Image (tube, rainbow, N blue to C red):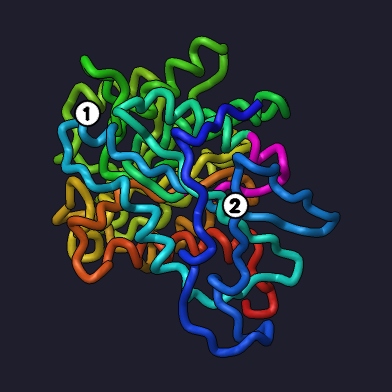
Amino acid sequence: MMMITKECYQPTSAATWTGRIDGTDPDLMRWHQVIRTVNLLESPLPALQPGERGVVLLGFASDEGVRRNKGRTGAAAGPAALRMVMANFPAHFNAHTIFLDAGDIICNNGELENAQLVLSEAVKAILIAGYLPVLLGGGHEITYGHASGIRQYAQQRKSKTGFISFDAHFDMRVPGEEGAHSGSGFWQLAQDCKQSGEPFNYLALGIQKSGNTRQLFNVAGEEGATYVGADAFHLHDKDTLFAAIQHFLSQVDEVYLTTCMDVFAAPFAPGVSAPAGNGIMPGGLFLQCYRAILQSGKVTGADIAELNPSLDIDNHTARLGAAIIFEILMAYCGDDSLD
């Protein structure tokens, strides 16, 4: 049973989704006109009918992990900023799409571990109901809760889980004195995989030498992680990137896909705790890689992490994060006639 309580959950008000209205014909509709809000405390997700595809947006309003990691807080406001930007997107969905907003999981009183547990249960319930969870961060502590829910779902299906992260950092640091944080998610997942006798399948794309100590490179190697550095994106090394992605995808059945907004160059993503002056560019090669992962059909859940609206400039980072979410939905339930 899902352990969501009113102390750690905030449903989204329907009034949150507002924006421009050009009309009510299907060809004129925008996201705010087609999305439906659901309260997970009051009712289960509506059953999908044969032929329908469902997507559930779920926020993780937490930056406790960022605080513990000695970063700049503010990412807890990320889900609200993403919703505001996404509201006016055109609804290029096929006719059999069910699009829901299930509200936010909240980290109260610094109880991150409990919030991550609740998040994992919510993700598992969304998957069991047949929907694709698309999560709105929040700090990168979102990874442990989100990916744990996918792992539990995959275990029930006896399928292999893989983790793909676009990030400047490995996020494989050992938890500190206060416990888990925004930089420990993949280390925690590696330990969980060991305990259950599963392989730890992790591909990190966009890693920066300037953002990771030698110890982190050593830990990644010891745990069997695969990575491709940011230089491959800078130098347009498509062969290396696609070989790594395709090899990884061939080894797994279910993929957790996360994008940390600090993987991008600071002019495109200033609203993060740790901006990267030499981060990757968000167009071109990144989009080719991202779309290749989505088009594999193996993505079981995806999220955006580390958007900090208090540090953003004219919503640049929020708009980029929202555009990535748009890519996810187009790959999963987009209208094929527009291709």
User: Label 2 amino acid?
Assistant: Val
Looking at this view, is 296 or 18 the one in front?
A: 18
72 with respect to 296 (left or right):
left
State whether residue 78 is above or below residue 218. Answer: below
Could you tell me residue 187's position as x and y percent? 36, 23
Picture coordinates of residue 136, whole percent (x, y): 43, 50
Q: Which residue is located at x 35 percent, y 45 percent? A: 138
> Could you tell me which residue is drawn at 48 percent across and 17 percent down?
192
Q: Which residue is mark 1?
A: 68
Q: Nearer the viewer, residue 98 or 132?
A: 98
Where's the C terminus, which quadrant?
bottom right
**Disc sitting over residue 247 in the figure:** none
* Left or right of residue 70: residue 37: right
Image quadrant assignment for residue 300: top right
Task: Identify residue for label 2.
Answer: 56
Residue 147 visible in image: no
The amino acid pointed to by label 1 is Arg
Label 1, secondary structure: give it. Answer: helix
Magenta residues (range): 125-135
Q: CA distance from mark 1 to mark 2?
A: 29 Å
